[in-house]
Amino acid sequence: MESLTFLHLPNKALINLRELCVVFNGESKGFTLDSIGRLRNLRTLFLENRGTVWNPTLQPLSQCQHLLQLKLHGQIGNLPTEMHKFLPNLKYLSLDGSEMEEDPMPSLEKLPKLTILDLFFCRVNKFACTAGGFPQLEILFIYGSDVKELQVDEGGMPLLRGFCSYNLNRNVSIPERLRSIPDPKNWHIARDDEWPY
């Protein structure tokens, strides 16, 4: 679907759908996540916006209590502050924040079960994780970001065991604890194998 203008899911057969990929144009008026929220058994969701900047509310996804994996790619802007209430069971998040102006960490660090976080092309200058943030995060991947500083307070990301960073500014400030964490071998291959798109 090059330009999604309307999504209607009346067929009860779709209720058991577990994986969904939606590519849409951000200029499509009336596009909401309400119909997707009706897919109560959804476990994997990929949303790609190819239009103007989209600041997703994500609140309708609170109905998808089994949602474990989420990709938000394309012209994604800022995230809602209540993500942890909408996505309490989310374990994997891939975020392309090319139009993001605010640090997403205050929203993301509250996700109680997030285990893997992929961040691509974020324009913010600083990522800041507070004490107690990302309580279950094990893998952090940052690619091609404009970030100049990654701050992790003591007690933040306590379970982190894999840290990968590519194409970052050479002068980026990263805590010594993160620099000492290895790049886990083949984890990205296993991750990609789980995604059919």
Image (tube, helix red, strand yellow):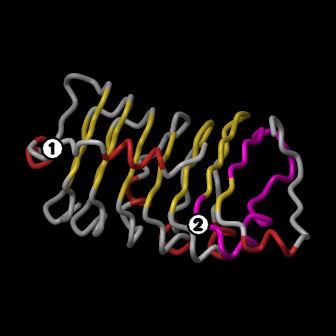
Judged left or right of residue 167, residue 103 is right
Residue shown at the point (21%, 57%) measured from the top left: 160
Magenta stretch bounds: 21-44
Judged left or right of residue 82, residue 112 is left
Q: In this view, does 167 lie above or below 39?
A: above
Q: Does the magenta stretch include residue 39?
A: yes
Upstream in the sequence, badge 2 or badge 1? 2
Residue type at mark 1 is Pro
Q: Is residue 180 above or below residue 8?
A: above
Q: Name the residue under label 1.
A: 182
Which quadrant holds the C terminus?
A: top right
Residue shown at the point (19%, 25%) measured from the top left: 171
Along the viewing direction, whichever of 13 and 107 lies nearer the viewer: 13
Q: Where is residue 68 in the image (x, y as percent from the top left)?
A: 51, 66
Residue shown at the point (41%, 37%) measured from the top left: 124
Q: In this view, does 74 lie above or below 86?
A: above
Q: Badges 2 and 1: C-beta atoms under 8 Å apart? A: no
Q: Does the magenta stretch include residue 152?
A: no
Residue type at mark 2 is Arg
Q: Which disc is residue 43 wearing?
A: 2
Which quadrant holds the N terminus?
A: top right
Judged left or right of residue 87, residue 111 is left
